[in-house]
Image: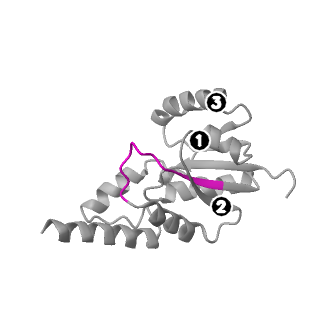
Amino acid sequence: MKNERIAVYPGTFDPITYGHLDIIERAVRLFDKVIVAIALNKNKTALFRVEERIEMIEESTKNIQGVEIVTFQGLSARFSEQMNAIALIRGLRAVSDFEYEFQMALINRKIGKNTETVFLMPTEKNTYLSSSVVREIASFHGDVSPFVPDFVQKKLEEKFKDESTRDN
C-alpha cells in the first residue's frame, strides 16, 4: 500500500497482557499497520523465550487486522525508521509512567527524526496491569485469567509448573 501509515509498538511482551492488546487495538484504528516489535534486550532476563513470546502474540492478535510481529535489537527509534514507521506507540498506564515515557519520547525524537511518539492509554480496567505483575501472580500459582488471554494463561501455568517440579 502506497503511503501506508505504519506504527511500531516496541516492548518485551513477557508475556503479552490485556493491557498490551488494548493498546494494539487502539493503535490499529489509527494506523494502517502496527508492528509489534519484541525487543531483544541482553540486559533483561525474560521468562519466555522469544519464540514463545511470538507464539503468544500471534495467537492473541490473530483476529486483529493490520498487525505484524517482529523482533529487534537496539534502539527502538532507529528500528522504527528502518520500518518506515511514522510513529512509536507507547502505552501510558498512570501518571508515574509519564515522566519516564516523556523523557524517552524526547530522546527518541533526537535519534529518530522522522518518528513521533504516540501515547495511548488503556481502558481503566487495564491501567494497573503490567507483565511483571502478571509474572509474579503466576509464579505463586495465582489466577491470571483477568489479565491475559487463555492461551497465555496456559503458557504461564506450564512455565511455573515446570519450575516447581525442578525445585523438588
* Precedes in sequence: disc 2 or disc 3: 2
**Between 67 and 112, the one nearer to me in the picture:** 112
Give percent across and percent down for residue 18: 50, 59
The answer to whether the residues at label 2 and label 3 have Cβ atoms under 8 Å apart is no
From the image, tell me which residue sits under label 2. 68
Could you say whether the residue bearing mark 1 is in a helix, strand or loop?
helix
- The count of marks equals 3
Mark 1 neighbour density, 10 Å: few (under 14) some (14–19) many (20 or more): many
Query: Which residue is drawn at the image coordinates 57% and 39% (left, top)?
Result: 75
Q: Is residue 114 above or below residue 166?
A: above
Which quadrant is home to the C terminus?
Answer: bottom left
Evaluate if marks 1 and 2 touch, with contact meaning CB atoms under 8 Å apart: no
Residue type of the residue flagged with mark 3: Ile
Pick the residue in front: 36 or 111. 111
Q: Of all residues shown, which one is farthest toward the left?
A: 168
| Above or below, 118 relative to 123 | above
Choose between 11 and 119: the one closer to the eye: 11
Identify the residue at image location x=60%, y=49%. 9
SS category of the residue bearing label 2:
strand
How many C-alpha atoms fall within 10 Å of the one at disc 2: few (<14), some, or many (≥20)? some
Residue drawn at the location 43% of the way across and 51% of the way down: 129
* Mark-to-mark CA distance, 1 and 2: 16 Å
In 3D space, how far apart are the residues under numbered discs 3 and 1 (Cα atoms)?
A: 9 Å
**Amino acid type, mark 2:** Glu
Numbered circle sitting on residue 76 = 1
